């Protein structure tokens, strides 16, 4: 079970005699311990999502969470009479999390055993370990970034967004317009780098070269006048998407070399990759340079090649490529484009740094 070394992304709580003291249906009154509240708030601030799996009357239990002032901390609640393993499976599926990133806390040994039997990858804690949860390594992420601190808010916004999308019947471009999408492209700062590093690790589908740059590699390039490290963030009327993309560009007088472009799978359907490429092409056109983009096929990033081809990158040979050092990897393709002006994005309000002017 190598997965057990991974960090927990969602902690699922039982309610009766675990989250609160007492059994709601029997005692009527239940109490929330200050220590439990601290754990809930503490995990939330670390970017660990929380959910509920409880055998209870749904509305009754949820009202009690609201009355205790903690309902907002739970992104998903499975409150009913089915097996806990089934509830946890549904929670993991809803969040698109692997089971080895889920943990479960329950006072009942039989409930933990049922979950352990069906979902051996899920970590199970007895309720008497709640006071130690904040000091467990698997509940202590290595880096807590701006985005991890607001991860719950981003998930909750996403649930609203999905519900809206499912109920929307017009053409999809109209839906995208209705979202009021915004994109910001800026030069990365030191503080951005942990988010950027996380992103290049997580975005295997949308990573043009499959190369994972470490924070250290990128930090060294921040001060290099020959390179631009750019971060892309997005938002819409539901809330922030957070950091959704990173680009690494080597800039020369006649050629800009796009060494890395990675965007989050979460924003593929909003055309984020194409918006970034069109912006970059427009900037290069203004600067009077050609563009070369590295693309190295992996089993998962074909969608990125489609984005490059769609934007007009080709295999044509151009003299500008002679100035490049050979690629480190023989699988790397160098796609070329002679830029021209591009139209502004149709469904996204873009605010971006000017590269051409500097
Ligand atoms: Zn050229």
Image (cartoon, grey):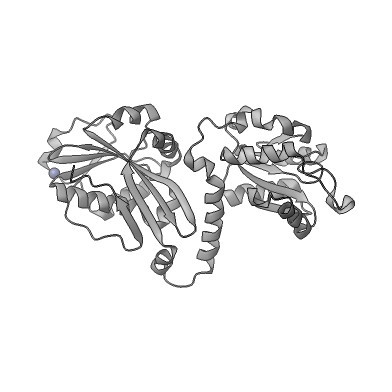
At a point 48% along the width and 55% down the height, the residue shown is 239
Q: Quadrant of ligand 1?
A: top left
- In front here: 42 or 174? 42
Q: Is residue 99 visible?
A: no
Q: Quadrant of residue 42?
A: top right
| Up/down of 174 relative to 188, above or below | below
* Residue furthest out toward the left: 319
- Horizontal relation, residue 218 to residue 16: left or right: left
- In front here: 136 or 87? 136
At a point 32% along the width and 63% down the height, the residue shown is 346
Instruction: Estimate the x, y position of residue 237 in percent, counting from the top left.
Output: 46, 60
* Residue furthest out toward the bottom: 170
- In front here: 70 or 151? 70
At a point 35% along the width and 59% down the height, the residue shown is 348
- Horizontal relation, residue 33 to residue 343: left or right: right
* Residue furthest out toward the right: 26
| Up/down of 281 relative to 128, above or below | below
Instruction: Estimate the x, y position of residue 213 in percent, counting from the top left.
Output: 37, 32
Instruction: Estimate the x, y position of residue 247 in percent, counting from the top left.
Output: 32, 41
Q: Is residue 259 visible?
A: yes
Q: Quadrant of residue 340?
A: bottom left
Picture mark count: 0
Q: Which of the image's four quarters has the C terminus? A: top left
- Horizontal relation, residue 126 to residue 268: left or right: right
Instruction: Estimate the x, y position of residue 317 in percent, counting from the top left.
Output: 14, 43
- Horizontal relation, residue 321 to residue 94: left or right: left
Q: Which of the image's four quarters has the N terminus? A: top right
């Amino acid at each position: 079970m190598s997965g057990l070394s991974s960090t927990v992304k969602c902690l699922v709580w039982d309610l009766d005699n675990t989250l609160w003291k007492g059994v709601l249906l029997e005692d009527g009154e239940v109490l929330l311990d200050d220590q439990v509240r601290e754990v809930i708030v503490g995990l939330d601030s670390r970017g660990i999502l929380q959910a509920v799996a409880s055998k209870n009357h749904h509305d009754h239990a949820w009202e009690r969470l609201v009355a205790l002032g903690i309902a907002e901390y739970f992104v998903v609640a499975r409150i009913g009479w089915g097996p806990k393993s089934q509830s946890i499976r549904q929670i993991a599926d809803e969040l698109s999390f692997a089971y080895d990133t889920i943990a479960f806390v329950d006072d009942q040994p039989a409930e933990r055993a049922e979950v352990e039997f069906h979902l051996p990858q899920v970590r199970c804690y007895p309720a008497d370990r709640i006071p130690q949860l904040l000091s467990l390594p698997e509940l202590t992420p290595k880096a807590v970034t701006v985005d991890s601190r607001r991860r719950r808010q981003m998930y909750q916004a996403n649930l609203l967004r999905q519900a809206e999308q499912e109920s929307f019947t017009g053409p999809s471009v109209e839906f995208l317009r209705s979202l009021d999408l915004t994109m910001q492209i800026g030069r990365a700062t030191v503080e951005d780098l942990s988010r950027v590093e996380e992103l290049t690790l997580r975005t295997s589908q949308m990573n043009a070269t499959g190369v994972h740059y470490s924070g250290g590699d990128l930090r060294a390039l921040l001060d290099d006048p020959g390179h631009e490290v750019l971060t892309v963030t997005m938002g819409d009327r539901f809330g922030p998407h957070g950091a959704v993309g990173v680009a690494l560009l080597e800039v020369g007088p006649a050629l800009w070399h796009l060494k890395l472009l990675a965007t989050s799978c979460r924003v593929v359907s909003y055309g984020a990759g194409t918006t970034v490429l069109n912006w970059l092409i427009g900037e290069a056109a203004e600067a009077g340079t050609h563009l070369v983009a590295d693309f190295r096929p992996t089993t998962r990033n074909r969608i990125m090649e489609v984005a490059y081809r769609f934007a007009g990158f080709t295999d044509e040979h151009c003299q500008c490529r002679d100035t490049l050092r050979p690629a480190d990897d023989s699988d790397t393709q160098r796609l070329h484009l002679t830029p021209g002006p591009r139209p502004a994005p149709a469904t996204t309000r873009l605010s971006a740094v000017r590269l051409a002017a500097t």
